Image: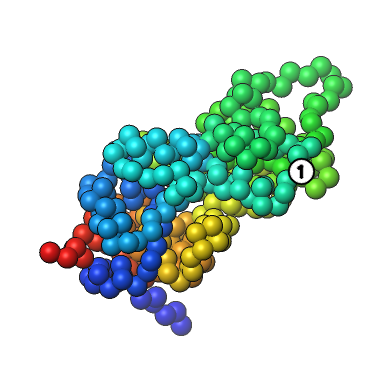
């Protein structure tokens, strides 16, 4: 006998939800913006929540930019958000390595874009790889071995539009041959929305390639893993039961909130449709769902 899971209710008491928490964590793509355009009503909603004394934190699985670059993106969209309020999976990779005191005589091999390089640099962690390896090809004479750096102590894999066989082989050699070399993934999103017209292979495709060649499981630092939740809760000294996680994706955002013991709110302004949310196949139910974050403006005192 299978019991149907009750589907999440539509949010009606906005003020009650807002009053029940002190912090809102917002996912970015599909909640704040879609690609490069701001979602309707976002500035007013953030202003209202701030005026009510709420702490606002922004978490994105997109590793292609650094905190600083996201700060500029928020600014270009007319939102005043400081770098310290932004937690991208690129930053999470660097923060994780810092938290385990990654040795200064070791380096990281990067499959990924500039965001990861910039965050590792900021954290004082040595790295090689990244976009610079995008043009490299393997051209070995018979019997010649491909060299790799034996000081690579971690491979960080994120979204990489310049992935090639050289990078796959380099990362594989490091993980398989360097004793204790870690395999860290910024995120495992199956698809992303580089353009609205279609879905594109996401960071999970690059991570999956290295899983395939190494037979190892990565340590994931992005959503839904609890690393960023624990990190920001400790950084701001907040209880996760006092947080509402707002996102557009069930298997990353809503699961991230639930794993952390937060209240969860799904918005339909991104990738999840009402049909998906209410389908019997969907096992991840948020506490509430709503159309977009500006629905929270209903709580505004007149
Ligand atoms: N990864 C990439 C490469 C993306 O382009 C996106 C969304 O644009 C994401 C991940 C998901 O980002 P978020 O967690 O902000 O929804
Ligand atoms: Ca999202």
Specify the farthest residue to the right: 143
Which is nearer the eye, 89 or 168?
A: 89
Colour logic: rainbow
Residue drawn at point x = 70 percent, y = 34 percent: 126
Element under disc 1? loop
Where is mark 1, residue-wise? 103
Residue 72, horizontal then vertical, whole percent: 40, 35
Residue 180, horizontal then vertical, whole percent: 80, 48
Residue 198 visible at all: no
Residue 65, horizontal then vertical, whole percent: 49, 36
Would you say 187 lies left or right of 216 here?
Answer: left
Q: Quadrant of residue 178?
A: top right
Would you say 13 lies left or right of 152 here?
Answer: left
Residue 56, horizontal then vertical, whole percent: 38, 55
Q: Quadrant of residue 195?
A: top left
Residue 133 visible at all: yes
The image shows residue 215, relative to residue 2, as above or below, that is above
């Amino acid at each position: 006998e299978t019991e149907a899971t009750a589907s999440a209710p539509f949010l009606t008491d906005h003020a009650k939800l807002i009053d029940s928490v002190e912090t809102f964590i917002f996912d970015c793509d599909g909640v704040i913006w879609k690609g490069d355009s701001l979602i309707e009503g976002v500035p007013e909603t953030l202003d209202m929540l701030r005026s009510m004394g709420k702490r606002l934190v922004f978490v994105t699985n997109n590793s292609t930019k650094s905190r600083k670059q996201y700060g500029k993106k928020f600014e270009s969209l007319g939102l005043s958000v400081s770098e310290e309020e932004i937690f991208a999976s690129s930053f999470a990779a660097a923060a994780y390595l810092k938290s385990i005191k990654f040795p200064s005589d070791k380096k990281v091999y990067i499959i990924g874009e500039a965001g990861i390089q910039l965050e590792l640099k900021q954290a004082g962690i040595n790295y090689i790889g990244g976009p610079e390896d995008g043009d490299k090809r393997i051209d070995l004479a018979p019997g010649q071995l491909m060299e790799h750096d034996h000081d690579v102590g971690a491979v960080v894999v994120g979204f990489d539009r310049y992935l090639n066989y050289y990078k796959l082989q380099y990362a594989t050699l490091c993980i398989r041959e360097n004793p204790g070399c870690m395999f860290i993934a910024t995120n495992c999103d199956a698809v992303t929305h580089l353009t609205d017209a279609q879905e594109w292979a996401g960071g999970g495709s690059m991570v999956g390639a290295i899983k395939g060649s190494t037979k190892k499981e990565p340590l994931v630092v992005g959503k839904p893993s609890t690393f960023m939740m624990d990190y920001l809760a400790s950084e701001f000294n907040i209880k996760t039961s006092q947080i509402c996680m707002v996102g557009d994706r069930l298997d990353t955002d809503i699961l991230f909130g639930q794993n952390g013991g937060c209240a969860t709110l799904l918005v339909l302004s991104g990738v999840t449709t009402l049909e998906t949310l209410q389908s019997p196949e969907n096992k991840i139910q948020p506490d509430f769902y709503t159309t977009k974050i500006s629905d929270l403006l209903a709580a505004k005192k007149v």
